Image (tube, rainbow, N blue to C red):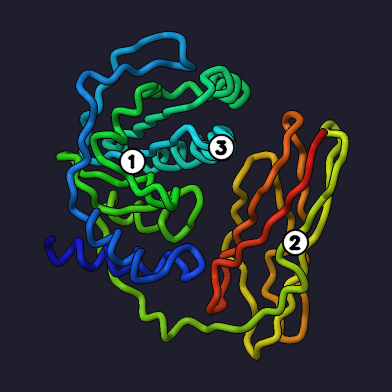
Amino acid sequence: MNFRNLIIVFILFSLFSCGDQKKEDVAALLKAWSGKEILFPTNPVFTVQDKDTIDFSMLGKYKILTYVDSIGCISCKLQLGKWKTFMEEVDSLGMNSVKFLFFLSPEKRRDLLITLKSERFTHPICIDKENRLNELNHFPVSDMNFHTFLLDKDNKVLAIGNPIHNPKVKELYLKIIQGETVEQKDESKIIRTKVDIGKTSVSLGNFDWEKEQKTAFVLKNTGNKPLVVEYVNTSCGCTSVDYSKEPVQPGEEMVLNVIYKAEHPEYFDKTITVYCNVETSPIVLRITGNAE
């Protein structure tokens, strides 16, 4: 592993909290995968909305690969609306040398097609029904953060993490692609505060799946510095969060208003991840319930 990759590993290590996994496990994963060549199946087939097979070249100076397995809600994992926004941003910056590679191995192909149509997602995808990509590479199963990679032209890993879930990962990807200097920030200089959260989990109980549900989480700044929320990510497009973007002064509170709109009847367990200037960031909140 060269010096540049070591720097990137160190930076990436700082992007994952202890709550995600034990830090030593994260460090070992990042070290093992940085610079590793991703192997692709021979002659992968790409389609548009699982219908029309197209001639899609995987060649590019940079590639952003995301792999989605068959476990859980496919639309929740994909969050195609956020990917479309990110792809448009990359395109607007003139980064035509970046290839977006979507390898999907859904348990229910019909659910995937419904998701692609509802999101109007027309970028080519590879439906890897035999899960060949994972068999070739053995991706870590413990954390979906390690199922998305920034690759160079030789398919070697430059960075790891999902840019639509973590703004710091997104910033890192864009810096590497644009050829900017990647430097490790001095974490000791970040102004941090403390928060008290009355509850980190809310059960919405049983309800009619067609009726929108609302709840709220309160973050109180118990430190002596302003609380700044950088970004809030949800695990599913069916969950949205509204909050004030202004810094929260010591002793004051921030309210995160959460709206859940089921796409169909289901028991759900969704997360809201809050990135802010506290030691325990990101803060993971959860809503559960049964949409009947």
Q: CA distance from mark 1 to mark 2?
A: 32 Å
- Mark 2 or 3, nearer chain start: 3
Q: Exactly how many numbered labels are in the figure? A: 3
Relative height, residue 78 to residue 170 (above, below): above
Give the image location of residue 164, x and y in percent. Answer: 49, 47
Give the image location of residue 248, x and y in percent. Answer: 71, 77
- Mark 1 or 2, nearer chain start: 1
Element under label 3? loop
- Left or right, residue 281 beside residue 244: left
Q: Residue furthest top?
A: 52
Q: Residues within 10 Å of mark 3 (few under 14, many from 20)?
A: few
Relative height, residue 284 to residue 262 (above, below): below
Q: Amino acid at mark 1?
A: Ile
Element under label 1? strand
- Left or right, residue 159 beside residue 124: left
Q: Amino acid at mark 2?
A: Leu
Q: CA distance from mark 3 to mark 1?
A: 23 Å
Give the image location of residue 268, x and y in percent. Answer: 70, 43
Q: Amino acid at mark 3?
A: Gly
Give the number of the disc on residue 270.
none
Instruction: Identify the residue at horizontal 47%, vertical 42% (top origin).
Output: 86
Name the quarter where the N terminus is drawn: bottom left
Mark 1 — residue?
64
Instruction: Identify the residue at horizontal 73%, vertical 34% (top origin).
Output: 266
Instruction: Identify the residue at horizontal 35%, vertical 34% (top origin).
Output: 100
Q: CA distance from mark 2 to mark 3?
A: 26 Å
Mark 2 — residue?
256
Mark 3 — residue?
72
Report the mark closest to the observer, 3 or 1.
Answer: 3
Relative height, residue 274 to residue 210 (above, below): below
